[in-house]
Amino acid sequence: MKKRRLVTLLTGISLVLVAALTLPLATGCTTTQPEAKVYKVCISQIAVHPDLDSNRQGIIDAMAEEGFIEGENVEYIIRSADGDMNTAASISDYFVSEGPDIIHAITTPMAQTQLASAEGTDIPIIFSSVTDPVAAGLVPSWEQAAANITGVSDWFDMDPQVEFILEVLPDIETLGTAYNPGEVNAAVQAEELHEVGPDFGLTIVEANAASSADVYAAGNSLVGRCDAVWIPTCNTVGGVGIESIIKVGEENGLPVFGSAVGMIETGLVGGCSVDYYWVGQQAGYMAARILRGEDIASIPPLRADVVTIAYPAAAERMGITIPQAVIDSANIVIE
Amino acid sequence: MPNVVGGVLSFSFYEGLVFGLVAVGVYLTFRVLSFPDLSVDGSFPLGGAIAAVLIVSGVDPFLATACAFFCGLGSGLLTGLLNTALRIPALLAGILMMVALYSINLRIMDGANVSLLREVTVFDRVAQSLQMSSGSIQVSITVAVIIAIIVFFVLNWFLRTEVGLALRATGDNEQMVRALGSNTNRNILLGTSISNGLVALAGAVVAQRQGFADVGMGIGMIVMGLASVIIGEALIKARGVARLLIAVVVGAFLYRLFITIAIRLGMAPGDLKLITAVLVIVVLAVPYIRKRIRREWLPPAARW
């Protein structure tokens, strides 16, 4: 009786396994063309997020532009870890076991675990949307790729960010910022803001939010302590919790500036942003060069460009008017 | 084809053993002590943080891993003390500790993330002595098996000693154990310490294998641990310490196996967790539905 139960259990598990593994294989076989080489390209991202999705789309579009077209000579395997770092490790192992021609890893933890999984193989890895690849241990320096990894950073300099705020509001003295200290990107940017603030005659104050539930309180704690707020590329405050910050800004006439297109579009005054689609495109071009036979070690990592964005209607809601000169010179004006 | 199945099974086997440590820790507090300790989400990254920071500063990786274990013991001890010394309810004590550990982990790492790439880890050391490539799954499994065997034998021995028996009895009937002259507070402290020590040990191993420690790596650990315990209990009728421990590790193995299968199934990004949940539901529901069909007696549903 007991044995039989164990046997049925094992059969059940193995059936699920076999089904799981043969289904994708069966569909994969029909699309393979024997003559042309079909490149296998893996793309992983830590979570589903507008910026990371445009990063991914940029990769696919740029590779297509270079003649590596999905369904023709490229087969993509795309996975998201849905925010779970241990799943990220499982995805990395899976990618390595597929033996792809190239792996794109989007975000810092994804790139780190991918590099650890690929140890001992020569699969080229291209990271994108990693803020500080040197601190993350991915590449030895900003000028030098490692033996099997290079990529595109979403690092931006802080000066243009502060300059933009001062163009809109020349008279402010105190600038606030809110972020989750558990996110490397955000913490690095906030630290830099503290460094450059005094050069512009600004005092920096900050508020921390460890989860999206804390964002509203963090935003409120800045009211009365500062003349304007700048939000770094923080998934907690600038991503899921951005509506809370907008609410605080509109209720209290506190102008809030942002650092990414996604958050500014939701209703911030404006700011400088990395174009994540552009980041993805550059990663895609790198991949094309490597697939054509270039040595990955000879392609140094790249820093992102920024675009300026103004959102006059959102500024009015926060009680300020953006000067016409700023609107005219902005790369993107949201109507 | 056998290659693919072998790959899936060996990855899950490694993960099952490592996350089995978390599951055993969760089992010790939730089931054995009836002490729902949620601080696991904090002590897992604590272990990773301690190991990573020590390794980066040049400490031997084995020593660093051991230190991570002892720091986990300490954090569990504090959780227990919140409950026994300050009379804070267990659930809240765990939550408070989890919240506090978030800040503590940030302090330990002086940031949110410490890279272990190109550092010498226990995996590199074992690979060196076996003369294998350190990225290979065989090395990962070897390390996991060694740790699991040590933990298994130590726990199997300890839980049968007089102290261990008292610890197990404390969760069943605290009043009776106290009446028999055993110090139940000490038993609870012992249990929460060992539990969090194991969880931190798992965190240290995981960080070394994935190449970094991150303050967010503990998110969802308690959910995974509980799911493993319940799956293990549902599938293996456990009598005796040894079978209990094995059941819990099998639960962890299956849970990770489902995630691996879900990853390979290739759903749209974002659907992964749903697939995992459905696979777990199927495994837990099948025995019930079979009994229904055979019109056997059905026990009432467990509430947790």
Image: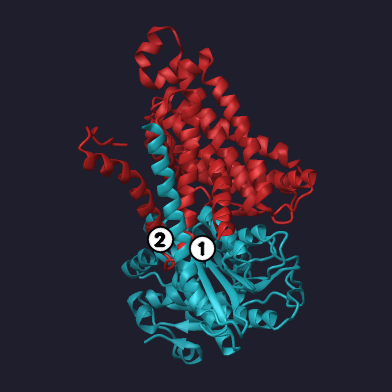
Chain colours: A cyan, B red
User: Tag 1: residue type?
Assistant: Ile
Q: Quadrant of residue B48?
A: top right
Secondary structure at badge 1 equals: loop
Image point 70% across, 56% down: which residue?
B117
Image point 39% across, 37% down: which residue?
A4
Residue identified by numbered label 1: A46
Q: Quadrant of residue A141?
A: bottom right
Q: Is residue B58 above or below residue A291?
A: above
Image point 57% across, 51% down: which residue?
B11
> Which of the pair B176/B21 is nearer the observer?
B21
Q: Which-is-in-front pick, marks 1 and 2?
A: 1
> Which of the pair B136/B268 is nearer the observer?
B136
Residue identified by numbered label 2: A219
Work out whether mark 1 precedes mark 2 in sequence or the reverse, and give the earlier one. 1
Please give the label number shown on residue B291. none
Provide residue B155's location: percent of width, then percent of height: 56, 25
Q: Is residue B290 above or below residue B88?
A: below
Q: Quadrant of the C terminus of chain B?
A: top left
